[in-house]
Structures are given as structure tokens and as C-alpha cells.
Amino acid sequence: MNTRNIVEFTLSVAKHNPSIETRQLTDLITYASELHKLYERQCNGYYSTRAENRDLKCEENILNSVRDIANAIGCNFYNNRDPRGLPIYLYFPDMIGYNDILSDGGWHGIGVPIR
């Protein structure tokens, strides 16, 4: 984990929502890391349908948790399923791309770093 990325992420989010809790930030980083691993497995292929179904259910649960945190801190999020980039980008109402996240594709969002 790159400490500089964590600090930059924390400061960027705190600029938009000073009342964010440390636990919410650490949860987002954990979820981003888990999604990244999951998307790497999807990209490399599965050895069984059971493993694929397990990952799909896990992805659904993680994205629901990310959605809950995003709602709690007052932002939207973009999910990038390409393992070459960050899996979660946050968009606050005062940011470019907030109203059209899908066409923005993470360009203007705050990327949640991975471990």
C-alpha cells in the first residue's frame, strides 16, 4: 500500500466531506482492494462455475456496501471493472461528471486506492 496515495485520497475526500469517518475510508480501501482481486480473477478466467458464481455474489455484496457508504457520505460512485485501473471512483455533487458518471468513466472522480 502506498501511503502517499492513501493520504491524497483522504485529503481529497475530506475536502468534499469533512465529516467522513476514518472507518468509512478504510472500508472503501478494503472494498476497492477486494474488487481489484476479483476483477483480476475474472480477467484470467475461472476453473469452475462454482468459483465464478461465488465471485459474482461477492461482487454484488461489496458493491452494495460501497453504495451504502457513498450514500452516507453524500456522493455517487463509478465501478470500473477493468483490473488495469482502480475499481472505485467517488463523485461528489460539486465535481465534474457527477451527473453523468457513466460517460465520464472515472476521469474526474476520486479514485479509491488499493492495497
Image (spheres, rainbow, N blue to C red):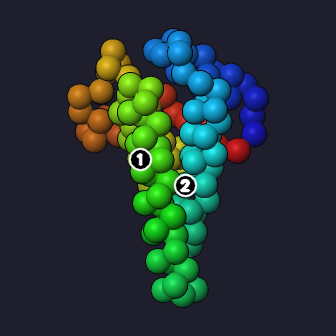
> Can you give x and y, in whole percent of width and height, for residue 12 in the image?
54, 18
- Of labels 1 and 2, earlier in sequence is 2
- Circle 2: residue type: Leu
The residue carrying mark 2 is 35
Helix, strand or loop at disc 2? helix
Q: Amino acid at mark 1?
A: Asn
Q: Residue at label 1?
A: 79
Determine whether, in the image, residue 86 is placed left or right of residue 108.
right
Give the camera-side residue of 18 and 32.
18
Calculate the distance from the C-alpha at mark 1 to the C-alpha at mark 2.
9 Å
Q: Are marks 1 and 2 in contact (CB under 8 Å)?
A: yes
Q: Residues within 10 Å of mark 1 (few under 14, many from 20)?
A: some
Whether residue 91 is visible to the viewer of this picture, yes or no, is no
Q: Residue at x 70, y 44 (%)?
A: 115
Q: Residue furthest bottom?
A: 48
Which image quadrant for residue 4? top right
Indicate whether 21 appears above or below 61.
above
SS class of the residue under badge 1?
strand
- Could you tell me which residue is drawn at 54 percent across and 21 percent down? 20
Identity of the residue drawn at 50% across and 54% down: 62
Q: Is residue 59 left or right of residue 97?
A: right
Percent across and percent down for residue 113 are: 61, 37
